[in-house]
Amino acid sequence: MSSAITKNLKIAFFSALLVLAVAYPVLGLKLTIVGIKLEVQGASSAALWAIAAGAIAMFFWQLFRSQLGTAWSHAPKLPRMPSQASDFLTQPSTQRWFILALVLVALSWPFFGSRGAVDIATLILIYVMLGLGLNIVIGLAGLLDLGYVGFYAVGAYSYALLSYYYGLGFWVCLPIAGLMAAFFGFILGFPVLRLRGDYLAIVTLGFGEIIRILLRNMTWLTGGPNGISNIDKPTLFGLSFERRAAEGMQTFHEFFGTAYQSINKVIFLYLIALLLVLITLFVINRLLRMPLGRAWEALREDEIACRALGMNPTVIKLSAFTLGATFAGFAGSFFAARQGLVTPESFTFIESATILAIVVLGGLGSQLGVILAAVVMILLPELMREFSEYRMLMFGALMVLMMIWRPQGLMPMQRPHLELKP
Amino acid sequence: MPDLYHYLQQLVNGLTVGSTYALIAIGYTMVYGIIGMINFAHGEVYMIGSYITFIVIAGLAMFGINSLPILMIAAFAGSIIVCSAYGYSIERVAYRPLRGGNRLIPLISAIGMSIFLQNLVLLSQDSKDKAIPNPLPGNFVFGESTMNGVVISYIQVLIFVVTFLVMVGLTLFISRSRLGRACRASAEDLKMANLLGINTNNIIALTFVIGAALAAVAAVLLGMQYGVINPHLGFLAGIKAFTAAVLGGIGSIPGAVLGGLVLGVAEAFGADIFGDQYKDVVAFSLLVLVLLFRPTGILGRPEVEKV
Amino acid sequence: MSRPILEVSGLSMRFGGLLAVNGVSLVANEKQVVSMIGPNGAGKTTVFNCLTGFYQPTSGNIRLDGEQIEGLPGHKIARKGVVRTFQNVRLFKDMTAVENLLVAQHRHLNTNFLAGLLKTPAFRKSEREAMEYAGHWLEQVNLTEFANRPAGTLAYGQQRRLEIARCMMTRPRILMLDEPAAGLNPRETDDLKALIRLLRDQHNVTVLLIEHDMKLVMSISDHIFVINQGCPLANGTPEQIRDNPDVIKAYLGEA
């Protein structure tokens, strides 16, 4: 009995020391530039107390781990939803009404919301679209693409360059941007998709970075680190939403004889984003019920079995990769239109990681999950402005924690219920 | 003669940087060899080592301690201790609970851990570059002058010597010691090693610690050589070291060394030809090319998939 | 006497220094059940892998209905009508049983992107027919009630049956079963025997079998090939093999 206690004590001490070794040098000491020299300053006493508290907490947790574990399992669980209610909710007809209601709400609320709210909602929609696109690649086909941001950049720069050099409008450039991204997806995917999971991840990451560095350095074409600015906003059948129209163009408020309201521009952009997202959702939902979508999922489950059934894995992977890239291209061109400005720094690996986090947290393969996760990931930092600099820190921690506690995501993908003919 | 000196200089610079890549790459390759996953957070451990180095050196300077041997020993010791603590903790927290099963999940956890660590340092230490003066100034000059000859700085010599000693030590450990044998057995067949009574959990933890310690050594050396650090250098260092590991043959320690040296030299000559700003493109392109055309690396053996 | 549909001669497979398969030859005629037996590690699964394109054989000749197929990649051989099951059942575990069967019909479905997007009548007809065929086969293997359950939740014997049903979705000419009776109790083995007979008699499928269950092999095979340590040892009808002294020695060692 005593040897168990001493063993636990040793482990507890070791763990506490570990916490100190990890926390104190990085959190307790700070390298500060004083004048021209570098100095080391101690952190605030609050921070130091927090570190000490952490170590002590770790000490006691390790010491009483087994007791705490049994206490936790005896704790009352949350009540489960009654089965009739959950059956009702998963009925296809119920879900259809629910989705219809959601779409109606989404279409109408911006006319009652504030400008800032609609703006954030548009940003969320961009990430929803990116998340859905990446979901095809990772969630459905099981290909770990860490360079997704590269296709996003291709879409954005396609519109920016076409607008800058040829003055083409948004609606013309939208399909072209998608095609360019698809093309890049095809070219990049072709040699790379036969690689194993981890390697594929790193290669795609490399590609994403290469695209960004090239965009930054090919100043003669892309404007270098400053990028391209003054990109045209989208128009509604030629009607611009600016206060004053450009040469030869009419503005929306002139045409309809209403007063100029800056919120109209924001609402218009929001509606375009909503349209794009709805189209994306429609396409993906159809694909899931088509041979191609099923092939993606089969490939993710077991590539060897797919080969044994006559499916060509390379073609299937390529289709997922290319289609995912296309949606990123659409999102990218909209992003360029909304911002009016594209620079290489908008397309770093952190963006890829953010989109990856959205897909993973939402639940690989689940569209509803992606939407929910995008809302959470983009909205929460906006609501908690004081904590905005902790956003990435929480992303990272959240990714680790979700993988440990709930790898299937917030809303795991549900299998469609297929009716067999009698 | 000037051309020859120029190329020799690039070679020397490349081999120097390459040997530090090799040190970090060994960490990747050892972990991959045993549990078959890429420790995405390894680059951040290196970055943390750089910060510890600077903290030790700047901190001791504040107390008026400027003697080089003391600074170096303290920097190595502090860096190795803290990095090892991080290496161990990362394995316990982010990887051990996820072992066995879907390959995607540990990889995502690793990416999350990498982002977490980078931002941890970013928030607690701020994002500005931090610089320290060169603690070991001075060069050896071969040839006629610094402009027309090959210049090898004392730090570069130090890098070579330390890296060489560490490699020798590691090789002896792996091949002669009992623990080293356990490491090799685990890398060959983890399940079997477990069944034979080797505590594979400890061996895996040890692998992470060794990798972290080596990254710490590299951090001290490169920190002294470049004299500037910021929280973002972990990402790039990690990618390059991983490239080196893959180039040489993932899972093979001599491969990691070879890969590191090759990458360092390729980068030096690449920067010479294409310009400094494309230096990183050289590394990424090399990575892509290797994975496309010879994924098993220079010293690796082709794997046959068992159906 | 039916004509040969699969002719293999001089098949060899070398892995580095190891010669796993050495000069194996076999012939399977239409509507036959042919078994490959031999002690563990004899190289039987390796032969399967070579025949189905998962390994590229080092040398040898494989003719499917007169056509050379050695060296072709796995999915191409599968499209020519040669499908297989695996020693460790390789179902799509998170997908339902019905989805497993639908995926396997990939090549026979309307895969036109626009047609699927717009739910054209042609697309809907194709999907309906696929569902009917899947339902038909679920019935054949007695798994109709599990149609919408994830394949991974089925019992082992049920998973094996599903895997065979999935193979039949591709309308194959040759069905290769790798140790289908492993882990089955005697009643399940009888069901398997009936299923194999059904496949051969009613669906014109040639069945190639790797098996260790001698009772099953002897009772169902039209022809048996024995392999030992990668080399062909004997071949013949079940009666011939049963009394062959070399075969007995290979399995039981010297008397």
Image (cartoon, coloured by chain):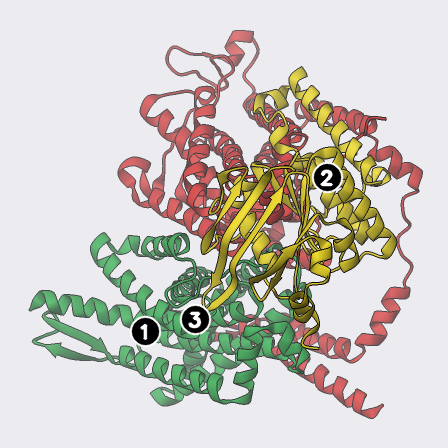
Chain colours: A red, B green, C yellow
- Give the mark, 1 or 3, whose residue is nearer the N terminus: 3
Camera-side mark, 1 or 3? 3
Q: Quadrant of the C terminus of chain C?
A: bottom right
Q: Which label sits in the foreground, 1 or 2?
A: 2
Q: Chain of mark 1?
A: B
Whether residue A155 appears in this view of the structure is no
Quarter of the image with the N terminus of chain C is top right
Q: Which residue is mark 3?
A: B24
Q: Is residue C151 above or below residue B73?
A: above
Q: Which residue is mark 1?
A: B225
- Mark 3 lies on a secondary structure that is helix
What residue is shown with label 2?
C200
Residue type, label 1: Gln
Left or right of B14: which side holds C167? right
The residue depicted at 30 percent of the width and 45 percent of the height is A217
Give me the residue at 32% from left, 42% from top. Answer: A224
Provide residue A413's location: percent of width, then percent of height. Answer: 72, 42
Which-is-in-front pick, marks 2 and 3?
2
Q: Is residue A54 visible?
A: yes
